[in-house]
Image (cartoon, rainbow, N blue to C red):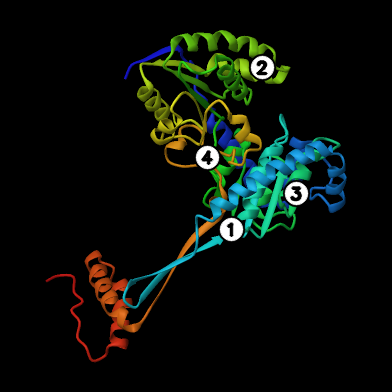
Amino acid sequence: MARNYLKKAHKTPTTDDGAIREIVQKILSEIELGGDAAAKQYADKFDHYDGNILMTAEEIAAAAAKVPQKLKDDIQFAHDNVRRFAEAQKSTLQDIEIEVVPGLIAGQKIIPCHAAGCYVPGGRYSHIASAIMTVTTASVAGCQNIVVCSPPHPGHGIAPAIAYTADLCGADTILAMGGVQGLAAMAFGLFGLPKSDILVGPGNQFVAEAKRILFGRVGIDMFAGPTDSLVLADNTADPLLVATDLVGQAEHGYNSPVWLVTSDQTLAEEVMKRIPGLIADLPDLNRSNAEAAWRDYAEVIVCDNREEMAATADEYAPEHLTVQAIDLPWWLNRLQCYGSLFLGEETTVAFGDKVSGTNHVLPTSQSAKYTGGLSVHKYLKIATWQQATREATKPIAEATARISRLEGMEGHARSADVRLNKFFPDEQFDLTATD
């Protein structure tokens, strides 16, 4: 496959996982041993906050009063869209039962997790949208207890808009605590909270590592790395829209890769020409992130045709995949590996990140090759059950006994034998594994 790299990344979004893991493991171990007091000590150290850990109803109401009505309307609009999409997703799963063989009924039940812990970043950026995405989906799924934790600001607590949004979307408790200590509080059931069955939501590398370590004891949405985005564009694409979309995603962080894959070199060169000016026009912090991400991690690739473009996208398996090209149905049917797909110039990743209804908690670092993003399904367990008549038990037990003995699992075989002996005492059965 012919690829011409007009810009090649000289870094990959890796971290010193060993050092981070050691730090995070120490914090988790000390909090598990020391409980509430240890969590508060880390909150004092990292959050520099000495207010209430569990927000009261009065504090939530006071926070809501600080949120402008126009912003409340926008949050409600986004919440409604995410809720409607989540409800539609939930409807694709249902309880079923089937008669597998005469007399043997098997089925599945859809059971929500009891307690969900939702992490909402609130440091460098206040992620209102993350509260919408995580809490709304947990609520639609039917989780009976939803806890939100978010980093408080010294002397002020959680950002008012985050507190308002979490409450609106269905949080039962809002925890003014960030970082590893916040996740530990939800996972270990500190401050009188139930232990979370699942932890969800984006965060920095320490939050991501804490989720990785806790996985198994609790469920998680996914292992998350730095956010990444890829744009597929042909000669019909608008270079200003393409460049703006790439810069918009690069502002996430210094190590957030953005990639342009195109079949038109003229477009690629025009986009590359526009990007420095668009970055320079960003506010200071956003500019610093975007400059580093574009300099160190971005790539611009020219392919011979759209099939090569699609194959490149599938290989990169981006978190966000945008198509600005003709024949959108072809791309929808062809593309296979992405967290979320944005078709046509009328939509953009920012729409999905904030308000359009699909979830923005998505697989990064090529994990879109094997998983999707956060959805209402992540909070739902598909549990199976079965019930049989005695007559149906006969062939099932016979086959079970013979297969078990062939495997060397005599205890399994005998649990079948004893039923045959009880239900059919006058019959003889060949329960050996050989002819």
Give the image location of residue 347, x and y in percent: 58, 30
Q: Amino acid at mark 2?
A: Ser
The answer to the question of whether label 1 and label 3 lie on touching residues, with beta carbons closer than 8 A, is no
Residue at 68% across, 46% down: 80
Residue 6 seen anywhere in this rendered image of the structure? yes
Q: Amino acid at mark 4?
A: Phe
Q: Amino acid at mark 1?
A: Cys
Above or below 417: residue 222: above
- Of circles 4 and 3, which is in front? 3
The first of marks 1 and 3 along the sequence is 1
Give how far apart the Cα atoms at labels 4 and 1 are.
Answer: 19 Å
Residue 42 seen anywhere in this rendered image of the structure? no
- Number of residues whose C-alpha sits closer than 10 Å to that of mark 3, classed few (under 14), some (14–19) or many (20 or more): some
- Of circles 1 and 3, which is in front? 3
Residue marked by disc 3: 168
Give how far apart the Cα atoms at labels 4 and 3 are.
Answer: 27 Å
- Of circles 3 and 2, which is in front? 3
